Image (spheres, grey):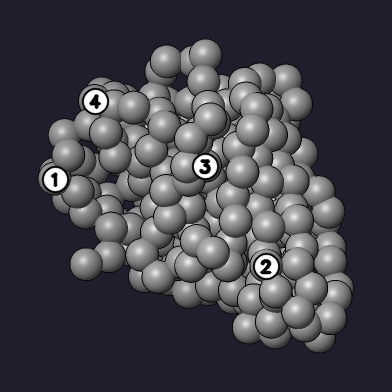
């Protein structure tokens, strides 16, 4: 079974508008972390935001916020005030367990295109 | 911030060549590094977990004799694609996490990746 599901292969958003990228996850481990990465066409992976399974509040980092709904096992990324430079692939990922030395499992990604 | 350097960024070589890719953590130590492979328009797939001073752990379906991993120091892991063939052409990317940071919320830091093209 897929551990990370991103159901939107591609999304379009108008510049300056907000956009939500969906992510659902599947785990039986009570301790886990959820990450979002941005991958521009050049290929590097840019860390955006993190949400821990025990965190009470939704994570925010500048224009990025994470809509964490634990009961529904969803961790959607919200990008506010979209910019042309936000056009890229976005990956949701999960790390299970308390140790930081377990690998990330990635979803299939969503390609975001910001339109002027 | 934490930086992972990956070299080379691009390799084009003939079939049958062995290619070595280096992954270095520049300002932190990493007892564990990870190697991922990404085919065009697909996600990152974990190939193996590289452990300093011990054997790597390979994911199911990844040939350990094909993809040799060496993690000889706390800042360097290498992936060698032996006798590469066109089907090995892919984007290979490594990641590492600062071993001194115990909080599990610390992200993995990725190298910039290596585009491998086998002719």
Measure the C-alpha gap from mark 2 to mark 4: 43 Å
The secondary structure type at the circle numbered 2 is loop
Measure the C-alpha gap from mark 3 to mark 4: 28 Å
Nearest to N terminus: mark 1 or mark 4: 1
Query: In terms of depth relative to the viewer, which is nearer, A21 or B27?
Result: B27
The secondary structure type at the circle numbered 3 is strand
Measure the C-alpha gap from mark 3 to mark 1: 25 Å
Q: Position of residue B4 (x, y in %)?
A: 71, 35
Q: Position of residue A52 (x, y in %)?
A: 33, 30
Contact, mark 2 vs mark 1 (Cβ under 8 Å): no
Q: Could you say which disc has been placed on residue B82 in the image?
A: 2
Q: Which residue is mark 3?
A: B50
Residue B4 seen anywhere in this rendered image of the structure = no
> Quarter of the image holding residue B109?
top right
* Above-or-below relation of A101 to A4: above
Name the quadrant of the N terminus of chain A: bottom left
Q: Chain of mark 2?
A: B
Which class describes the residues within 10 Å of circle 1: few (<14), some (14-19), or many (20+)? few
Contact, mark 1 vs mark 4 (Cβ under 8 Å): no
Q: Which residue is mark 4?
A: A54
Name the mark nearer the viewer: 1 or 4: 1
Name the mark nearer the viewer: 3 or 2: 2
Which class describes the residues within 10 Å of circle 2: few (<14), some (14-19), or many (20+)? some
């Amino acid at each position: 079974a897929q551990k990370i599901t991103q159901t939107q292969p591609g999304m379009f958003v108008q510049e300056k508008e907000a956009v939500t990228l969906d992510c659902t996850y599947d785990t039986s481990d009570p301790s886990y972390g959820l990450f979002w990465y941005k991958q521009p066409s050049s290929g590097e992976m840019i860390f955006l935001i993190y949400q821990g399974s025990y965190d009470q509040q939704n994570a925010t980092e500048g224009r990025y916020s994470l809509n964490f709904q634990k009961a529904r096992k969803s961790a959607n990324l919200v990008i506010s005030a979209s910019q042309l430079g936000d056009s890229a692939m976005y990956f949701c990922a999960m790390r299970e367990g308390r140790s930081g030395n377990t690998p990330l499992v990635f979803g299939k990604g969503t390609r975001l295109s910001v339109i002027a | 911030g934490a930086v992972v350097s990956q070299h080379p960024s691009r390799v084009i070589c003939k079939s049958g060549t062995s290619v070595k890719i280096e992954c270095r953590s520049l300002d932190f130590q990493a007892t564990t590094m990870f190697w991922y492979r990404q085919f065009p328009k697909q996600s990152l797939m974990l190939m193996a977990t590289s452990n300093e001073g011990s054997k790597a752990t390979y994911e199911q379906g990844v040939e350990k004799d094909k993809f040799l991993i060496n993690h000889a120091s706390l800042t360097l892991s290498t992936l060698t694609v032996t006798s590469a063939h066109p089907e090995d052409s892919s984007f290979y990317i490594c990641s590492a996490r600062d071993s001194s940071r115990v909080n599990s919320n610390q992200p993995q830091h990725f190298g910039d990746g290596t585009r491998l093209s086998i002719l």
